[in-house]
Image: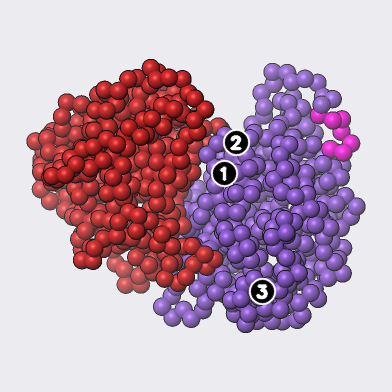
Chain colours: A red, B purple
């Protein structure tokens, strides 16, 4: 998350359910003014702890300075939907799908999984058309939600586009592009090692540990005034200049957000544009986005390439379609197919380790998660349950925004990965949408 | 301006010209990272002093937390343009118009006035069509610019809509709607007195005086952490609760930003929506805006109803058309004509005083400036040269964003008011656009 977020360990009290912690039920920020104990503010309140985070994920820009990812000013290109009747039928069918959560004895329905996962918005695209869409909690279809570490995948895609276009040499040393980091652990790393997070850095990224380096990093990154006695670096890039080595570059995958910000710096210097500007130019404008997105910034205006993105659910659906279709959307090619192909080729599973039980045998490449198995699944993932999940075998994209109480996707994977697989299996087996009867005058069901 | 803006008095050095102070020429925030002396940041740098303000007016959201005024997610409704040839011809004709600045001996051309006024964007609509449009400095047609005190007119319009719809009683005492201010100077004021700024309050609003109350107000309003020894109120509304009386309600017009925030609070409580939400629902969404707008917020998330708006130039053109056409745009009525009619009816010129030399004989009503003279001109105005200028007699709207070095519209009026009048006279006299020849294959001139 962005600067100043204090994702504290949860108390031992029973955690509120999705329904109980719904921000509208909690009453956060309702009324003019809200009651004092219902005000969420930066920096006094612990705005990114559950259950407050269930409001904050939709309102990052009210808490922090941000920079726009402009969609431009033309008309959006609407997503295709299956017809009204098919949509209603498929939604009922998907809601009723059952699966067995990893490690559980009892089956769960898809619909139940949405609450179990504290889902705020979920979109399923099949054969390039929307077949399922729901909003909960703080989100609606005109809202924006924190993408958390999915931001890394955006940065990784932009870098991979530059590589595919021959503008960025993935084998170059980072120090040859960014001389400022010559005395840091990045000096001897290659661009590819940064993209795949196989750099040897000293950096702990355990969001549940309040002493983790990630929070020190957040202090550097905060756009708020530094405390008078603050001695640390100011800004993402100043922090990167002093990261120390630990282990050897290229040896193993270690999930460290600083790599994404290093990559953001590389992308910015190569493209002579910020990550936000490049995301607008290469993705949001040409893909016909319906909303601007935005990114949090540090005190020097640098967008948080490792976690600062907030965007609309359907716009990340467009991004998912671009990944599924290797750079093409609405019959328009936005970037070389080689960019996605390289991401899908993945990294070395032997280096991936065992920190992510549900993904063992997979890899992390160009800031995307490559799943094990034969379906070629790959995903952007962010803490608290964010994902853009691309299943090429099923021709399916699932985008989920969530506000799961804990900052730990390993806890949400058990009710997620088999659920997504159940939908993929259903979509692979079901008759094509074009075979379904023509639309009747059935109103589209409420998307709550 | 928003919290923390330190619009210091100008030094005695010669002021840079518009061309010299162009942010691209100054090099603000260019490079990855920019050179240290070219970084504009909050709160360390004095980001709202000239010449930095020429960058900052387009980048408020990168410096402060903000809340969106959503345009929704549908297609924008494009503004009508005169055809390409007419546009080119009229632009040349308007550029060449001459006028005599107030108090000057020498004539100036319209084109020269744009530089004299540090114009960042200017749009002229005639008979509901765009006849002139140019961007300079930090702005382009997909950018947003600080509207400054034009925000008050937005708040005033929303209040006037609620009055016209019978939801807000302009004769009610403020304390009957907002009991929280019962011990402040607002307690005995009516809603109408707040709308017309004829309240009797102790509040100095001289932006050029660093000791003015407006800066104390800004401290209360700042979304940044308060200094440890800070004893003042936190937030716009907490400040309002303790404003002291001075003079008598209803006696005279005194331009005081706090009235706009009082009105914002009234509007929010009546509509049960923030000013930003209401502006989206009643204006930005239904008028077919092409960009979201946004407002700065205080530490409690309250939008700055007195000055926090940033918006696209053409979207304020749409707002201007709504004012010109009394609530109608694209043949759709968004609010009762009575709302605009009441604004145009104005306040009592006898109470207006002589603080605004170019406007003597006019008035201030519902947070709009009603000009003297028979053409029925009225305007939203904001420091540093912002205006939405509506001339019903000429069927003309001019929207200007600017970053004039000083926070004092009396200095820019002499090169503005006669210039606008010259365009009005030209448009009244010229053949109707429909009489002009059909378009040839002439490219639209660059809008720089």
Disc 3 vs disc 2: Cβ atoms closer than 8 Å? no
Up-down: is A120 above or below A52? above
Q: Is residue B167 left or right of residue A393?
A: right
Residue at image x 79%, y 36%?
Answer: B127
- Secondary structure under tag 3 reads helix
| Tag of residue A147 | none
Residue under label 3: B176
Q: Residues within 10 Å of mark 2 (few under 14, many from 20)?
A: many
Q: Is residue A102 left or right of residue A445?
A: left
Q: Is residue B381 left or right of residue A90?
A: right
Q: Are marks 2 and 1 on the same chain?
A: yes
Q: Position of residue A209 (x, y in %)?
A: 20, 61
Disc 2 vs disc 1: Cβ atoms closer than 8 Å? yes
- Secondary structure under tag 2 reads loop
Residue under label 2: B76
Find residue A53 and report its image quarter. Answer: bottom left
Find residue A52 and report its image quarter. Answer: bottom left
Q: Is residue A18 visible?
A: yes
Residue at image x 37%, y 37%?
Answer: A123
User: Given the image, what chain letter belongs to the residue carrying mark 1?
Assistant: B
Up-down: is B215 above or below B397? below
Q: Are marks 3 and 2 on the same chain?
A: yes
Residue under label 1: B71
- Secondary structure under tag 1 reads loop
Between tags 3 and 2, which lies in front? Answer: 3
Up-down: is A332 above or below A367? above
Residue at image x 75%, y 50%?
Answer: B336
Find residue A324 and report its image quarter. Answer: top left
Q: Position of residue A54 (x, y in %)?
A: 36, 56
Answer whether residue A225 is magenta in the image: no
Q: Earlier in the sequence, mark 1 or mark 3?
A: 1
């Amino acid at each position: 998350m962005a600067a100043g977020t204090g994702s504290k360990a949860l108390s031992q009290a029973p955690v509120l359910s999705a329904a109980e912690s719904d921000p509208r039920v909690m009453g956060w920020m309702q009324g003019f003014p809200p009651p004092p104990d219902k005000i969420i503010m930066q920096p006094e309140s612990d705005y990114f702890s559950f259950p407050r985070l269930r409001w904050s994920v939709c309102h990052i820009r009210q808490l922090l300075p941000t920079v726009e990812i402009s969609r431009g000013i033309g008309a959006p290109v609407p997503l295709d939907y299956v017809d009204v009747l098919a949509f209603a039928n498929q939604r009922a069918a998907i809601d009723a799908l059952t699966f067995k959560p990893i490690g559980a004895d009892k089956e769960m329905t898809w619909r139940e999984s949405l609450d179990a996962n504290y889902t705020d918005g979920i979109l399923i695209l099949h054969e390039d058309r929307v077949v399922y869409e729901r909003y909960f909690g703080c989100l609606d279809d005109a809202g924006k939600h924190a993408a958390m570490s999915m931001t890394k995948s955006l940065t990784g895609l932009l870098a991979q586009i530059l590589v595919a276009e021959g503008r960025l040499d993935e084998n170059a040393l980072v120090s040859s592009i960014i001389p400022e980091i010559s005395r840091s652990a990045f000096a001897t790393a290659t661009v590819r090692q940064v993209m795949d997070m196989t750099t040897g850095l000293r950096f702990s990224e355990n969001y549940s540990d309040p002493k983790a380096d990630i929070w020190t990093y957040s202090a550097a990154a905060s756009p708020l005034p530094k405390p008078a006695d603050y001695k640390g670096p100011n800004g993402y890039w100043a922090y990167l200049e002093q990261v120390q080595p630990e282990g050897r570059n290229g040896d193993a995958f270690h999930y460290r957000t600083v790599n994404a910000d290093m990559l953001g710096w590389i992308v910015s210097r190569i493209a002579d544009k910020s990550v936000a500007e490049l995301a607008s130019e290469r993705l949001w404008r040409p893909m016909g986005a319906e909303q601007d997105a935005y990114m949090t910034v540090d005190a020097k205006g640098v967008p948080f390439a490792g976690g600062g993105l907030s965007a609309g659910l359907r716009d990340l659906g467009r991004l998912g379609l671009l990944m599924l279709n290797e750079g093409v959307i609405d019959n328009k090619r936005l970037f070389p197919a080689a960019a996605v192909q390289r991401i899908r080729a993945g990294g070395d599973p032997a280096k991936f380790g065992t920190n992510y039980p549900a993904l063992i045998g997979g890899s992390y490449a160009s800031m995307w998660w490559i799943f094990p198995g034969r379906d070629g699944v790959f995903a952007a993932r962010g803490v608290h349950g964010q994902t853009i999940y691309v299943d090429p075998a099923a021709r399916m994209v699932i985008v989920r925004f969530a506000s799961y109480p804990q900052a730990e996707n390993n806890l949400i994977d058990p009710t997620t990965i088999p659920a997504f697989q159940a939908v993929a299996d259903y979509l692979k087996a079901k008759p094509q949408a074009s075979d379904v009867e023509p639309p009747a005058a059935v109103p589209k069901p409420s998307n709550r």
